[in-house]
Amino acid sequence: MGPILLSAQLLNILKSPESVDEGARYQVIFKRLQLAILQGALVGGTRLPATRELSSALGVARNTVKTAYEMLVAEGYVETVTGSGSYVAHLPESVLRNKPSKTKQDPGLSVSEYAKQFLGFTPLNPDTRKLLQPGIPAIDQFPIEQWKRCLARAASFKLLESSPPAGDLRLREQISKYLLRHRGIEVKADQILVTSGSQQAIHMVAQLLTNSGDRVVVETPGFPGISGAFKAAGCKIDTVQFPLIDALKQKAALLSLTPSRNFPLGHTISLAERLEVIRWAEAEDAWILEDDYDSEFALGHPVSSLFAISDYQRVIYTGTFSRSMFPAIRLGYVVLPELLVPLFSRARRYMDGGLSGVTQVAMAEFMEQGYFARHLKKMSGLYQKRLNILSQEVKASCLSDLPILGAEGGMHLVLGLPDEIEDKRLVKQLKQDGLGVRALSGYTQEGPKLNGLVIGYCAESEEQIRRGIQLIGKHYKNVRGHSKLG
């Protein structure tokens, strides 16, 4: 059957660092014997020592070696012969790693055309939070004790079962009531689909309502995650700046807007333009994707949404709790025209099967108990105070000559930069100092590039805001000095 493996050779193969935990040693033995077999160091027919002999040589429990052998046998690397012992199995030469095919080449990353789109996109969000980063709520002010109570009430055996694909009914009912009170949207709970943030809703719309080659119009500046989802679906992206009328002279499959509060500049589309957009969609049989980013914190009474003033079923409305609650909640929703409900509900089963029920029920409880409304009211006041502090710090600094392009509430302020100072270059320097300020040009899709800084403030204390503006001012003076010398 072959030679018995020499103990010295085996010990060399199985030599293990002392840091390996006792409970994991059988895994180490298994892995190293597996690798030795695949690399041809242990040829087929080689007889392995008895478990007692090997465990003694390695100084481990016999059951440790026995478990490793059993794993090798179970996966086909080793065969046992009753009364004789354990032997390395004869594997085809072509699968052994020491004998690569002569024609084998580095295959690279073989992915679909759809996947290749994502590989070319710039990452949307950093993994760690930085100072003055836009879109980050004041998590330290979140009513965590109330949220814990809602989570505790949500935990039940009932929720161990699967949830409806559209999401928890109680949460959808609460969202329906919220939309009626705050956005003027009168909609049944059945028309609401709970999503993992608004980005999933956008992805579903792109996949289900557009085809490769379709013309999709997105506003610029705007959130790149929207255009990215439609680009990945193979759509031809055109952009529109305000006023909108010129962009609506051509046929398109879909128009994406943040009409109540543009992201990131914060302006609102006039009533005439909103009505014209709806008329265009109805005439062209096109869809309107209405993203309601951070409208909860806009100053004054919010304007009616497109969904609320549309008589026909051409508007799809998306919202998220990631800004009003906390980013990790990963809950959002899409409000659908009734004719789209069966399609999206059925597709949801195949796309991801729905979301965790516990968080949804806790969110429903949080809204039903009035915690959500009180939290929004508190945050609106806090964010306005912090915006005032930020504005005062800007005016008192060397940044005072820069125009404020957008500051009507919300969660960030936009400062314009002179043409000779590239915003991305400045932001790169700020990042090295721990700042999460974004470049305004990163939100422009195509056409004329805007140049400026998008500065968050919601999560920062007065002292942090002051320090952040001082750092921005320091780098701005430095870059401005270099540009003048140039």
Image (tube, rainbow, N blue to C red):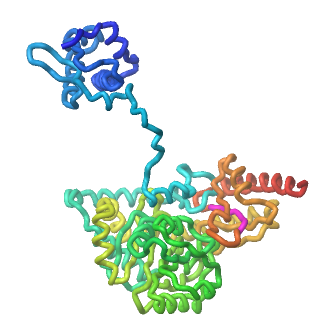
- Which residue does the image show at 37% across and 17% down from the upper left? 16
In the picture, the quarter occupied by the C terminus is bottom right
Q: Residue furthest front?
A: 102
Give residue 76's position: percent from left, percent from top.
21, 29
Is residue 270 left or right of 4 when viewed as pictured?
right
Give residue 280's position: percent from left, percent from top.
51, 90
Q: Nearer the viewer, residue 130 or 256?
A: 256
Q: Is residue 134 above or below residue 28?
A: below
- Which residue does the image show at 55% across and 59% down from the upper left? 136
- Which residue does the image show at 36% across and 24% down from the upper left? 39
- Which residue does the image show at 27% across and 23% down from the upper left? 26
Q: Quadrant of residue 201?
A: bottom left
- Please provide the residue range marked out in magenta: 450-456
Q: Nearer the viewer, residue 460 or 22?
A: 22
Q: Quadrant of residue 384?
A: bottom right
Give residue 100's position: percent from left, percent from top.
39, 30
Q: Quadrant of residue 453?
A: bottom right
In the picture, the quarter occupied by the N terminus is top left
- Tally the marks: 0
Q: Residue furthest left?
A: 83
Is residue 387 left or right of 373 when viewed as pictured?
right
Q: Is residue 263 above or below residue 47?
A: below
Q: Nearer the viewer, residue 397 or 191?
A: 191
Is residue 321 something one can see in this rendering? no
Is residue 50 something one can see in this rendering? yes
- Residue 35 colored magenta? no
Give residue 461's position: percent from left, percent from top.
62, 56
Q: Main secondary structure of the magenta part?
A: strand
Q: Is residue 42 above or below residue 256?
A: above
